[in-house]
Amino acid sequence: RIHGVFHVGLLKPFRGEPPATTPALPPTSDGRLLPGPEKVLQAQLRRRVWYLLIQWAGLP
């Protein structure tokens, strides 16, 4: 989980060129990163219910 409070003594002055745009944040839920699906490895229809084997991005 991400703790939203820090001590002001941890701040440092910024040096260098500021970025032109801010990068997009990854999706989170309750402070945890949500992996996205990369591809469907296997799909089966059993008794009118789909069972999918998913390869998640960034996970084995």
Image (cartoon, grey):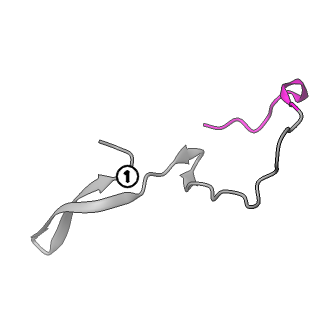
Image position, residue 23 (x, y; %): 66, 57
Q: Residue placed farthest to the top in the image?
A: 9
Name the image quarter holding residue 27.
Answer: bottom right
Q: Per the image, is 58 magenta? A: no
Is residue 44 shown left or right of residue 6?
left
Q: Secondary structure at mark 1?
A: loop
Q: Residue furthest front?
A: 16
Identify which residue, 47 or 27, lies in the foreground.
27
Identify the residue shown where x is 19% and y is 69%.
Answer: 50
State the image coordinates of residue 16 (x, y, percent, origin top left).
83, 42
Write the residue at 72% across / 58% down. Answer: 22
Which residue appears at 26% of the width and 57% of the height? 54
Q: Residue at x 34, y 52 (%)?
A: 56
Residue 10 lies, in percent from the top left, at: 84, 26
Q: Quadrant of the N terminus?
A: top right
Q: In screen coordinates, is 57 left or right of 2?
A: left
Disc 1: CA contacts within 10 A as few (<14), some (14-19) or many (>=20): few
Which residue occupies the foreground of this view, 12 or 50?
A: 12
Dominant secondary-structure state across the stretch colored magenta:
loop
Location of residue 45 (image quadrant): bottom left
Taking depth in this image into account, of 49 and 40 the one nearest to the observer is 40
Residues drawn in magenta: 1-12
| Residue type at numbered disc 1 | Ala
Please indicate whether residue 49 sits to the left or right of residue 29 in the image. left
Q: Which residue is mark 1?
A: 57
Pinpoint residue 48: horizontal percent, then vertical percent. Answer: 14, 75
> Looking at the image, is 11 positioned above or below residue 26?
above
Q: Is residue 8 magenta?
A: yes
Q: Outermost residue, bottom direction? A: 48
| 6 in relation to 46, above or below | above
